[in-house]
Structures are given as C-alpha cells and as structure tokens.
Amino acid sequence: MENKLVTVIFDRRKLSAKKGMGYLEVRVNLGHKVRKYITLCYTSPENWEKEAASEEAKLLIKKCEDILTAMSVLGEESNIENFNRHYSGDEKKPTAPKAVEKPVAIAEQEEEEKSEAKEPDNSKKNFITFMEVALDNEDLRPGTRRHKKVVIDAIREFGEMNTFGDLTPKKIIAFDNWLHDGTRTDVTCYGYHKKLHKWVRQLYQMGEIAQDPYQVVTLKRGKSKEREPLTELELKMMRSHKFEPKLERVRDLFIFAAYTGLSFCDTQTFDFGSMTKKEGDMYYIDGSRIKTETKFFTPILGPAMKVLEKYDYQLPKISNQKANDYLHVIQMELHIRQKLTFHVARHSFATMALAHDVPIENVARMLGHQDIKTTQIYAKILRTTIERHATALQRSII
C-alpha cells in the first residue's frame, strides 16, 4: 500500500482528537519538501485502515504511481504543476529540463493504464450529507449552528444541488435567484452564500471538486435596510398603555430591552443577583452576550428598573416566536408604523443614547459590539442631535 513516493496517511491536520474524525489522504513525494496531498475521504480513527485498503484508494495510489513513472520516462521536472497536469488530463505543455518525444509504445501503454486506473468519480457523492457531517463536527455556538442548518435546509428545498457534480457556477446563480423570492433581503441572501461557500471551498481544497464555482460567480452583498427605532414618545405611549396580561408581559420585556439595550436571548438568561453591579444610585448589567460571548456593561435605566421591580427582579420567560407574535398584536393595537421586534428595542436604546450625547464608543460597549461599525448600523444619528451640536459649536467660535 505504501512506498517511498506514494503514501497513504491519516489525520495530517490532527482533527480526530477534537472532532473524532480526520482526513484520509494520499501523499505524493515529488522531491525535497515538495509534496502533493489528495484527499480520499473524511473518516474515523477506527475505520481509516479499512478505507485505505478500499478499491477506490488502490485506484488512486496506482494512478499516482503511474503519473510519477510517466514523468520520469518523459524527462519532466518533478513538480506539482506537472503532476497536476497529468492528474487532471490537461494537455498543456509540461515544464521540463528538455523536450523529450514520447515513444509510441509508451503512449499506448499510458492509454491502457489510463483506462484501467480511472480517477474515482466524485460527482455522485451527496453534497447535503457532506454538509451535515461537516456541521456535526464543527465546534459552534448554538445560534451559529442553527443559522448554518437553515442554509442546509434551503439547499435541500432548492433541490438542484444534491451532489458534488451539481456544484457549478450555473447552479450557484440558480440558487441565488431562488433565494431572491421576496422573502429575504439582499444581505440575508449574501449570508447564505457566505456560509455555503465555506463548504464548497473545503471540497475544492480537498480535491473533491475540480473547480470552486464561487471563483467565477460575482454576488453583490446589497445594502442593509435602515433600522427604524421607536421614538421616546412612542416608548412612553407603549409604557402607559393598558394591555391584556399575555401582551403586557411581552410589552414589559420589550421595555426592559429598550432601556438596557439587551437582545431577546439575553433578557431570557438575565439574572439580577449575579449580573448586576450598583454604582451610586444606579444598577448596571455586567455580562457577556450569548450570541457572540462579548462582554458588555450597560445601565438599567428607570423604566427598565420598574419592570424588574414589577416582576420581583425575575423577568418573564417566553419563546422568541411567541414574543414576536405578540409584538405584532401590540404594534397593531398602538398603530405603530414599523414592524416591532426585539431588534427594534435594542436599536431604540442605541439611538436614544446617541441622541442624549453618549459617545458612540460607550454605546458600543453597552451593546457588546466588537466593532464600532456594527454600532453605526444600529445607531441612527438624529438630525436634532447634529443641530444641537452645531449650535454649541457656533457659540464656541470666536
């Protein structure tokens, strides 16, 4: 199975210790520190020897050995470029120290061996299964795992990229057109491609597909829709409105988020006893975001504090889906123009903080943003704020 030039190796990247699986590869030694790696499969430490002895592995080993023999007979330079040319069947001129005419007998022999040792056909391998296995072996936060699973489900529903052979530029464009059905924003569609491309690129790097289709397809990210916050007047109206009990609990959660900047999932894990600090007369939340694990430090403003007192410092628990359903009812009852979500509450907090001259760097810390550019997306700079600053600037000019 192994010789000096062509060797079967397992888990070169040391993945199995962490993920329980590793890559089985054929290593071709082309010279001093010049090696070509060709992936056979993704398997476990228990099964790799069985896979290495498979017919597919034997065919690939023989093909590599035959290529090395042909390169030697033809006097070609032993490098990756020449090897790849033979491996892919490309007839471009080789890089060689000198031109050597191929004898007829050798040419006939190569044709015979080429027909006997065909390259394993990867085009029929199941792409959806590959993505699911790859996802299972990734160490991800629950939220990130869910987002990637949504992409796999979309590929399954699309129905035209089931195998490795389906991964073509034409199919990528068709998938993009399918995504743009009016239910997703341009940015959301681009996010699907971004996640999908990682798996496609992995297959290309493993040698499972001959081309990365994303290298020839240009996709535009598009622009994010400007997030519309609630005004302070709208928040005050929401706080004072009388709702039925089930809507009241969701309204209170929304108010808490709007006056702390917390996301929905962070409100559901909030613990007053372990996550707050008192500085002067105010309480602050000192915690880490569930989504990104980024630290944040934010005040509990008056209306949010009243919500905590109302529920004996234990916020109501509810599913995200149910909360958003009830927010839609609240929106209709209050005749608010924009769609209400907990993202709107978080954005309202950011905009309100900026409107009251809180530096954007501090707002970023309150929201737990790793990059201030994210804060700039959430925080709409109000015209009234600019006018007030301009007036102050005018007074300071001598």
Image (spheres, grey):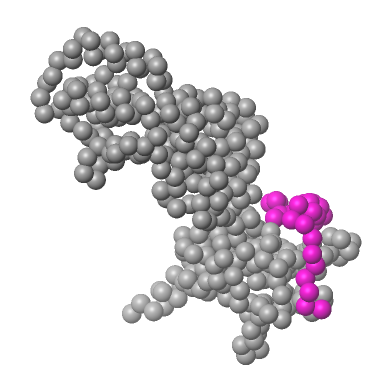
Q: Quadrant of the N terminus?
A: top left
Whether residue 243 sits left or right of residue 54 in the image: it is right
Task: Name the foreground residue: 323 vs 378.
Answer: 323
Q: Is residue 230 above or below residue 55?
A: below
Q: Is residue 85 visible?
A: no
Q: x, y percentage for residue 209?
A: 44, 30
On-image quarter of the C terminus: bottom left
Residue that appears at 66% across and 31% down: 157
Q: Height in image: 301 above or below 62? A: below
Residue in front for this viewpoint, 119 or 272: 119
Residue extending farthest to the right is 244
Q: Residue at x 47, y 71 (%)?
A: 361
In this view of the protein, which residue sits in the foreground, 40 or 197? 40
Farthest residue to the bottom: give it. 280
The stretch of residues the image draws in magenta is 312-341
Q: Position of residue 260 (x, y in %)?
A: 65, 71
Task: Specify whether 305 is left or right of 216.
Answer: right
Left or right: 333 as drawn, with respect to 1:
right
**x and y percentages locating residue 166 in the rendered image:** 52, 25
Residue 124 in sight in this render = yes
